[in-house]
Structure formats: structure tokens, C-alpha cells
């Protein structure tokens, strides 16, 4: 599904190159559930951002659904991204001024769905995540776990093929974390969504089908479960 | 999508109430101020546009060249216009108007109609004043015909039909027939009268021979040219015209005329000539236009500043939206949309402000600029369009800044916003305060000049001086005698003119230093024996008029210093005993008066002559004691009623009368002051918003500093310093700019203040104090806050 070849990411600090990712290559197949692990500063989030096209590598090649992302223009990349990728964050990143339903609806607005269609899709998603009763609440009125649920619902509403999650359970207690992980597993198994998550937790990492360990911007080890 | 944006916009506004209030209020005040100025300016520009033939109507004006000076006057002598019409086929018609103050009586009802005018019968043909009743062709034809405006007619006839009624006009009670009823003249007309009397009344009845007096200036003449006629070509033919008709007399009198044609529509704003009509000032129109642009600019700058300052808070939203698929363009549109929504709310508020403040503004402007903002629907439309345009323009920059945030950056932990846009924000604050400080300096200078004019020693006494205007009633002298004996009256004098009022200019011949009789146009006061004493006018040579010299009534003249300088005398003594010839009288100069300001301080003191005349002196000046003033005035009124029963009692105080000359300047000053206050207010609102956001951003820094031992004053100082530097910089820029413009403004005054350093110092200190007060509130709040709280939230 996606392929990174000899990707590096570095920042120029006083004439020195400060590498965040160093000549890293990675292949991801459709239907995989990958957990990326590693200590702070090992490049986990940077890798995820590059995969998610939020950031560009300094060097290397990036292919996604057989398109050369590194050659695409901003607009084409954005279109590709909109169609295929959903993002989940550690800090949820919901829009505070919008209700639960409106937050979930937002991606559809940017993909030019009609109003009625959007309503139906949102209702469907609320139902699926059992948060119908909360649809008119604002993020501040929800618990962390509930907010993350909304965040995932939002990431999934446009039916992405790839779900990227940056420490999705980092701000949650263990019980909430487990629920989210169960949800991920179900999405992966039943809906065939490819998932790449960054995590610090061994336990959460084991929900995946492959664990990649990063150290100093390189893949230190890769373990198929 | 739009609904979503709209929702977000409103919720955002609601969530940050303080910010929204500052932003919207600032903008509304700015737009309101601008709107008022716009109405004022368009009103000033609308003068006389209502005449359908305005593009063909010209005012005939004259330059009179005497051996000593050139007089630019807006009036003409009576024979000019009719003869021009006769001689030149391109002139379709003419109207002469001569303003007057007439006593009008109908039964027991009597008024002194101060705004009366004699007008030719063509008045309603040339102009578009609306005659409601009567025949526009003949209403002003026959002698002793009168046309009233509606509100004037009401005073005499109530709601009854006035047509065909007889009224008695002037002190001689000449019966006149009401031949027309016209609508009140519009506010934006240079010609304003409450009552018109046929010109033939003047030329054939009251002042026969006027039509042949080529040297008697007093009629404002308008020419209606035929379509396509070129005024320049016509102007070029005038020298030949005057040579043909009046050449010999001109040469003999050494007074030469040059005629010019002023387009009717440019008279009000552009003509500097005195005339009978209302006059405005194109400079003021420009000044206010610039002020309006400035205020709008300040308000927009606030808007841009506050919005970009808040971008840190919106950054997260931008990041999220981009992550879920928003494109830059879509986000930019959203933010521009929000700014338009904000401006629409400001628009509603502006409407509210305008409705509430309009009466006040009309009062300030001294005329009905607009009876109501909804009376012109397109005003509201302009306002709406302006608001939307402001929203679009002011929204573009913040929208571009916001929509270009990179999600990776803004979603990763703390986003500081960095120093990007800081320079711009500072520049904008500096421009705001430069404008504000310049306006403060302008205001102080305008007010200092006003104060200077009102308190300067004018060279005559105007305090406790009551002026009774008998309008030339024959009984004036008797009334003066009667009043002189009243308790509370210190002294009295009669005259034809008083300082600050009008006076005739007389064709005079005065012996100059070389011993020749030199021709000049001298301002002339007719006075009685007591006048010089009454007004405490100082004599620098010779003597004042005296009853001891029986010949004074016929053969004596006083001149002022300006006059003897004009005739070449180096000391006033030399002028004593020299010959004069003026208006049929001959005699000697008996005294020289010290110059006194008989006109406003805008003008240099002109050469003035005074002569004794014991009859027909309409103005009685009464020096009264300040005690029992009411009783004194009542006693005077009683005497008036006995001696001049036909005229309504009319009096005023000289000091107020004199100061009335500065009404335009005072109004200008007041308007200027108000707009300066507004500019400062809006700037401070912006500063307040900016300061509060900047302190918010530095909460963490303040917390850390406090933990490390910083004191509250130290932190307040740190936070205030950044902004104060900007204000000081603004001051440095504003000073020379405002000096330049105010120096120019002052050139209109012959007697003016020097722009001294304290004015700038005062303005600077004022701006700093205001800015400091604005900032320190926020700074102190931030400095006093508990560091534990601000650090914990990280």
C-alpha cells in the first residue's frame, strides 16, 4: 500500500544536519496493523507525519497506493490524503467550538458531500460508536476516552483506507485505552482498515500485526506477530 | 459549508466575548464616525446641486481695483446683470438678489425678518425653488410683492391662505401684497431667505435710480447662460462691456472693475469672496475626508492586529481542519467569511449608533446634515457595502496568516506563534498612534487658537455692552436719550456699525503725505459724539469728536493707524488737519485712532474712517452694570415699546455677537476634537486587546520570572515598556507631520498663535498616559497572578 525508500528527515542547526529520520525504508501492505515503538526522540512521530503527508521528507522516495508522493503537487497530495488517510491524535484535537456531531462531520465538508448525505453518515457513525446521546455536547463536556472515540469516529467517517494514530491512548487510563485498542483491532479485522499506530505501551503494541522499533531515526528491529 | 463556518464564527465570537466586544465596538465606532463624516462631506458637496440648470448658472463677481488695493467681492452693482443680459445673446436670463433685514407687520403680529431678500422676477425661472402657491412668472414682478416661505407665512397667517393678503413692510409701513408661497429653502442652498420681495420694490420704490448706479455694490447677480454657451468666452467680452457703458466714470473715480463668472455649484465651497450667501470651506471638506480615512484605517488596523494576535489560539483549529482534509483556500475563505460576519455585526451596531447619535451630530454641525439615516436608503446600502468590503479587505491578511499554518507544527505541543507578524503588528500600532497623536496635536492647536482669538485685547471694550438694533428707526436717538437716564445704564452711544458687524465701504479721497488727494475705498463707520469713549477706543493723535466743535458734524473725520499708513504718513501726528472728501462731504482729519479689531482676527485690520452723523444711526450700544441686568433690560424694553412701538424689541450682547464670527472655527474645532477622541478611543481599544493577548502569551514567562523572584512593578514595567516604545516612536513621527499641517491651517488667521513646544509635549504626555493606563491594567493583572497556576497549566 505504501512504501518509503531511503527516507531521511533532518534539520539544519548551525551548519550541522540534525537527523530525525536517517535513511529509513519501510513497506506497508494493505490490511496490516503496525505498531511503531521507540524511545522519545527516536523519530516515531516524524515517521507517522511523513506517512500521513503532514510533513515532507528531506530526502528519499515516498509511494502511496502506487503514486509517487514526493513528486506530487500540494493540491494533488491533499486530494490523495483526503481520500485515503485518517488521523487520530494523543491530544484528540477536536475543535472546541463544534459539537460532537459537527466535529465528526467536518471531514465530509471538505470532501464536498451533500448536506443530507453528511447527516446520514454522521448518524451512522454516532450509532456505531454508541455516542448518539452525546452528539450535541461540546468536547469540553466529554471524558478523555469519549473525546478520543469522537476523534476516531471523525478519522473514520470518510472511510479511509489507512488510519494513522499518534499515541492514541497516551492521555487515557488503562481501561479506556483497552477499549480503544479493541476498537482498532475490530476495524482492522472486520473493515480491513490498515492501521499504523505510534505507542509507548508494550501491551498496546501487541494488538498489532507487526511491531517496528525505532532508534535514532533508524529501524532497529521489526517483529511480525 | 457556509453554515458550518457561520456557526464556528458566531461560537468563536461568543466564546471570546471580551475580544469580540473590543473588536466589534472599535470597528463600529470607526464606521460610525466615517459614516457621519461621509454624510457631512456629501452634504457639503451637494450644495446647489438641486437646481436643474445648475450647470448653466454662474455668479457674476467683481474685482474692484483702487489705487491702493484690489477688492475681491462676490457682489455687483445693480446695472451690471441687466445690461449684460441686453448686450450678450448667450445670456438667457439673470437674477439679482439683495439680502436685507425688513420689518414686517400684519395686524398686531410684527417681526424683524432678518433673512429677507429682494429678488428679480426671474427668480423662480432660473432657480428650482418650489413655489407652492402663486404664479412663478409674475410673483416677483410688481413692486411691493412678497413671497413667503411656508414657515414664515405661518407666523403671520397660521394655516390660512396668505395669497392676496397685505402686509406692511419696512419702518415706513409700505403695504405689500403676498403673491406667492414657497417651500422653505433647502438647507444645502447658498441662497437662503425666509421671505422674498420683488426687486422692483427696491429699484422703483425704496431706492429709485439704483438701476443706474454703477458704483453701488450690493446685489448678488446670477446669470443663466444658454445651453452650450462658454463662460470663458463671455468673461473675455466683459472688459469691452464695462468700457462701453461706464468707462468714463471708472477713469474719473480711479476704480476699475473686472468681472468673473463663478459656476453656481462651486460658489459655496470654493469661492473666497464675500457675498450674501452661505459659504463653506473646501479645506474643511478635505480635512474631514482625510480624518475619515484615518479613522477607518485605525479601526481596520485594530481588526487586523487583534485577529492576527489571536492566531495562536486559532492555530490548533487550523491544524485539525487541515488534518481532516481542508485546503488552504477553503480555510482562507472561512476566515475571511468570519471577518465579514464580524463586520456585519458591526454594521448592525453602526446603524444603532448612527440613529442614536445623528441628532447630536446635526447639532454639532450646526445644520441638519440628515433628518434620519433611513431617509436616504442608499446611505444604508453604502454602509452595508462598506462593512462587507472592510470585512473582506481586513480579513485577507489574517486569513492568509492563519490558513498557512502547518498542522505538524501547530498540533505538536505548544505553539508560540513566534515573531512572525510581530513587526507588522508593531508597524500598525505605530501608524495608529501616529494618527491619534497628530489629531491630538491638531485639536490642541485649534483650541489654543480659538482661545487666543477670544481673549486677545481687541483694542476696544466689548464687555457688558448691550446692542439695541432699531434697524435705522428715526426714533433711535430719542430712545438713546431715554435709556441714558435709566438706573443700571452707565453710558450710551449711537452708530451705524459695531465691531464684528457690517459696515459700508466708501469711495474716499484723502490727502496723502505728498499733499495730493488720493483715492481709496475706506471702511466707514457713522457714529455720534459718544462712540469713541463708549468703546474705549484709544486716540494716538489729535482728538476724538466733540460737541465743542460745531463743525464736527459736517467736516471732521477720524482715521485709524492702518489708514494713515496707507496714505504714507510715518507718524499719526502728520495726518492731523489733512483734507478729506467722502460721499459728498469735505473736511479735515481731526484725530487718529489706535488700530482696533473691527473685524474678526482672521483678517488684518483694514483702513477705517469714522464720521459723525446724528440721524439714521440704527444701533444703540448701551454699557450696563452687571447688577440687576434683567431689570435693566426690562426697563430698556419698556422705553422701546413707548418710542418704537412698531418694531419688535431686539437686542444682543456685543461680546457674544463678536464671537459669533468664529462659529465656523468653533464648530470645526468641536468636530475635530470629537473625531480625535474617537481615534484615540479606537486606538486604545486596539492596544488593550493587543496588550491582553501579549500578556496572555507571556503568562508562562511571567510565572517563571515570578518564581525566580521578579517583583510586580518589575513585571509591569517589562510588559509596558514594549508598547510605550511604540507610542514614543509614534510621537516622533506625528510631531513634524502635524506641525506642517497645523502651520498651514493657521495661515488662514491674520492674528495667530505660535506653535510652541508645550503643545507637542502635552500631546505626547497625554498619549503616553492614556496608553500606559490602557496597558498597565492588563500588565498589573498578569503580574499579580499566582505563578503556580500559570505554570501548572503547561
Image (cartoon, coloured by chain):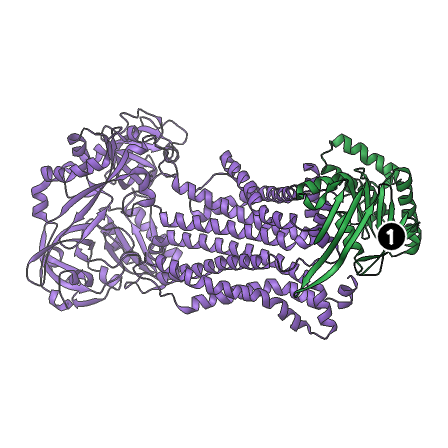
Residue B278 visible (yes or no): no
Any idea which chain is the purple one in this picture? B
Decide which of B66, B162 is in the foreground and name it: B66
Q: Is residue B384 left or right of residue B192?
A: right
- What's the residue at 61%, 67% (across, down)? B720
Residue A121 is situated, as x and y percent measured from the top left of the image, at 81, 34
Chain the render paints green: A
Chain identifier of the residue bearing label 1 in the image:
A
Residue in the image at 46% along x and 40% along y: B370
Q: Is residue B626 above or below residue B651?
A: below
Q: Is residue B325 left or right of residue B674?
A: right
In which image quadrant can residue A126 be found? top right
The quarter of the picture where the N terminus of chain B appears is top right
The mark total stands at 1
- Residue at position x 59%, y 51% in the image: B303
Whole-percent x and y of residue B242?
Answer: 13, 39
Q: Is residue B43 above or below residue B787?
A: above
Residue A7 in the image, given as x and y percentages of width and height = 75, 53
**Which residue is the site of mark 1?**
A169
Residue A153: which quarter of the image? top right
Amino acid at each position: 500500500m505504501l512504501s518509503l525508500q531511503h527516507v531521511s528527515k533532518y534539520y539544519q542547526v548551525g551548519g550541522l544536519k540534525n537527523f530525525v529520520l536517517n535513511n529509513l525504508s519501510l513497506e506497508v501492505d494493505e490490511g496490516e496493523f503496525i505498531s511503531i515503538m521507540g524511545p522519545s526522540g527516536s523519530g516515531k512521530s516524524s515517521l507517522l507525519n511523513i506517512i500521513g503527508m503532514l510533513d515532507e521528507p528531506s530526502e528519499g522516495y515516498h509511494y502511496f497506493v502506487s503514486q509517487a508522493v514526493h513528486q506530487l503537487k500540494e493540491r494533488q497530495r491533499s486530494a490523495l490524503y483526503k481520500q485515503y488517510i485518517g488521523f487520530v491524535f494523543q491530544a484528540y484535537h477536536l475543535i472546541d467550538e463544534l459539537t460532537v456531531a459537527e466535529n465528526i462531520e467536518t471531514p465530509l465538508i471538505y470532501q464536498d458531500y451533500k448536506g443530507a448525505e453528511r447527516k446520514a453518515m454522521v448518524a451512522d457513525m454516532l450509532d456505531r460508536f454508541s455516542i448518539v446521546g452525546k452528539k450535541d455536547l461540546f468536547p469540553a463536556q466529554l471524558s478523555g476516552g469519549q473525546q478520543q472515540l469522537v476523534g476516531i469516529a471523525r478519522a473514520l467517517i470518510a472511510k479511509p483506507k489507512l488510519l494513522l494514530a499518534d499515541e492514541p491512548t497516551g492521555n487515557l487510563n488503562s481501561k479506556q485505552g483497552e477499549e480503544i485498542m479493541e476498537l482498532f483491532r475490530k476495524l482492522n479485522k472486520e473493515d480491513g482498515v490498515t492501521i499504523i499506530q505510534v505507542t509507548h505501551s508494550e501491551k498496546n503494541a501487541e494488538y498489532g500485526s507487526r511491531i517496528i522499533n525505532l532508534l535514532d531515526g533508524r529501524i532497529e528491529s521489526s517483529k511480525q506477530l | 459549508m457556509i453554515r458550518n463556518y457561520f456557526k464556528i464564527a458566531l461560537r468563536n465570537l461568543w466564546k471570546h466575548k471580551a475580544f469580540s466586544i473590543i473588536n466589534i465596538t472599535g470597528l463600529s465606532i470607526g464606521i460610525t464616525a466615517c459614516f457621519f463624516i461621509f454624510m457631512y462631506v456629501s452634504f457639503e458637496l451637494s450644495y446647489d446641486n438641486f437646481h436643474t440648470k445648475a450647470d448653466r448658472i454662474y455668479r457674476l463677481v467683481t474685482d474692484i481695483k483702487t489705487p491702493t488695493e484690489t477688492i475681491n467681492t462676490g457682489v455687483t452693482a445693480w446695472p451690471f446683470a441687466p445690461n449684460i443680459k441686453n448686450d450678450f445673446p448667450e445670456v438667457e436670463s439673470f437674477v439679482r438678489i439683495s439680502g436685507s433685514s425688513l420689518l414686517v407687520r400684519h395686524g398686531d403680529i410684527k417681526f424683524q425678518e432678518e433673512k429677507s431678500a429682494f429678488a428679480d422676477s426671474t427668480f423662480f425661472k432660473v432657480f428650482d425653488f418650489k413655489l407652492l402657491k402663486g404664479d412663478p412668472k409674475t410673483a416677483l414682478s410688481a413692486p411691493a410683492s412678497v413671497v413667503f416661505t411656508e414657515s414664515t407665512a405661518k407666523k403671520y397667517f397660521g394655516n390660512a391662505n396668505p395669497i392676496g393678503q397685505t402686509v406692511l413692510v419696512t419702518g415706513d409701513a409700505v403695504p405689500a401684497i403676498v403673491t406667492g408661497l414657497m417651500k422653505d429653502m433647502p438647507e444645502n442652498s447658498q441662497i437662503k431667505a425666509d421671505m422674498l420681495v420683488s426687486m422692483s420694490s427696491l429699484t422703483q420704490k425704496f431706492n429709485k435710480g439704483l438701476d443706474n448706479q454703477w458704483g453701488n455694490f450690493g446685489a448678488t447677480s446670477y446669470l443663466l447662460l444658454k445651453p452650450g454657451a462658454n463662460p470663458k468666452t463671455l468673461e473675455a467680452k466683459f472688459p469691452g462691456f464695462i468700457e462701453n457703458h461706464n468707462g468714463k466714470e471708472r477713469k474719473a473715480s480711479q476704480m476699475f472693475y473686472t468681472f468673473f463668472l463663478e459656476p453656481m455649484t462651486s460658489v459655496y465651497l470654493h469661492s473666497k469672496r464675500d457675498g450674501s450667501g452661505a459659504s463653506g470651506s473646501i479645506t474643511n471638506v478635505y480635512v474631514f475626508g482625510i480624518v475619515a480615512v484615518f479613522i477607518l484605517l485605525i479601526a481596520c488596523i485594530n481588526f487586523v492586529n487583534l485577529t492576527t494576535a489571536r492566531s495562536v489560539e486559532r492555530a490548533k483549529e487550523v491544524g485539525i481542519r487541515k488534518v481532516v482534509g481542508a485546503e488552504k483556500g477553503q480555510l482562507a475563505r472561512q476566515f475571511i467569511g468570519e471577518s465579514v460576519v464580524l463586520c456585519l455585526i458591526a454594521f448592525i451596531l453602526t446603524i444603532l449608533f448612527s440613529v442614536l447619535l445623528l441628532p447630536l451630530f446635526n447639532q454639532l454641525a450646526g445644520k441638519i446634515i440628515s433628518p434620519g439615516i433611513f431617509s436616504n436608503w442608499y446611505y444604508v446600502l453604502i454602509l452595508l457595502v462598506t462593512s462587507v468590503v472592510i470585512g473582506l479587505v481586513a480579513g485577507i491578511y489574517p486569513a492568509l496568516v492563519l490558513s498557512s499554518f502547518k498542522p505538524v507544527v501547530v498540533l505538536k505541543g505548544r505553539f508560540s506563534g513566534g515573531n512572525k507578524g510581530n513587526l507588522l503588528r508593531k508597524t500598525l500600532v505605530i501608524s495608529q498612534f501616529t494618527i491619534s497623536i497628530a489629531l491630538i496635536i491638531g485639536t490642541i492647536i485649534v483650541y489654543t487658537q480659538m482661545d487666543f482669538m477670544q481673549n486677545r485685547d481687541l483694542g476696544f471694550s466689548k464687555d457688558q455692552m448691550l446692542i439695541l438694533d432699531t434697524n435705522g428707526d428715526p426714533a433711535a436717538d430719542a430712545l438713546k436719550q431715554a435709556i441714558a437716564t435709566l438706573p443700571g445704564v452707565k453710558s450710551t452711544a449711537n452708530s451705524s456699525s459695531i465691531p464684528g458687524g457690517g459696515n459700508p465701504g466708501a469711495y474716499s479721497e484723502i490727502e496723502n503725505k505728498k499733499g495730493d488727494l488720493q483715492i481709496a475705498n475706506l471702511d466707514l463707520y457713522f457714529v455720534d459724539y459718544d462712540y469713541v469713549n463708549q468703546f474705549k477706543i484709544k486716540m494716538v493723535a489729535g482728538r476724538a469728536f466733540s460737541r465743542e466743535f460745531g463743525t464736527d458734524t459736517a467736516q471732521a473725520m477720524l482715521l485709524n493707524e492702518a489708514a494713515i499708513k496707507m496714505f504714507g504718513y510715518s507718524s499719526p501726528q502728520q495726518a492731523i488737519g489733512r483734507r478729506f472728501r467722502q460721499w459728498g462731504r469735505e473736511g479735515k482729519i481731526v484725530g487718529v485712532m489706535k488700530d482696533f479689531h473691527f473685524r474678526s482676527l482672521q483678517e488684518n485690520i483694514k483702513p477705517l474712517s469714522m464720521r459723525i452723523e446724528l440721524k439714521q444711526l440704527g444701533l444703540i450700544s448701551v454699557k450696563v452694570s452687571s447688577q440687576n441686568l434683567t431689570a435693566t433690560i426690562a426697563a430698556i424694553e419698556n422705553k422701546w415699546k413707548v418710542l418704537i412701538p412698531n418694531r419688535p424689541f431686539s437686542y444682543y450682547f456685543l461680546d457674544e455677537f463678536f464671537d459669533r464670527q468664529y462659529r465656523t472655527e468653533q464648530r470645526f474645532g468641536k468636530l475635530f476634537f470629537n473625531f480625535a477622541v474617537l481615534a484615540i478611543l479606537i486606538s486604545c481599544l486596539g492596544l488593550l486587546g493587543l496588550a491582553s493577548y501579549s500578556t496572555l502569551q507571556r503568562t508562562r514567562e511571567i510565572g517563571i520570572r515570578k518564581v525566580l523572584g521578579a517583583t510586580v512593578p518589575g513585571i509591569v514595567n517589562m510588559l509596558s515598556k514594549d508598547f510605550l516604545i511604540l507610542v514614543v516612536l509614534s510621537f516622533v513621527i506625528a510631531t513634524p507631520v502635524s506641525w506642517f499641517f497645523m502651520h498651514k491651517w493657521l495661515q488662514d488667521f491674520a492674528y495667530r498663535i505660535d506653535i510652541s513646544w508645550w503643545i507637542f509635549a502635552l500631546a505626547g504626555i497625554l498619549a503616553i498616559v492614556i496608553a500606559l493606563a490602557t496597558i498597565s491594567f492588563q500588565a498589573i493583572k498578569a503580574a499579580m497572578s499566582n505563578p503556580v497556576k500559570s505554570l501548572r497549566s503547561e
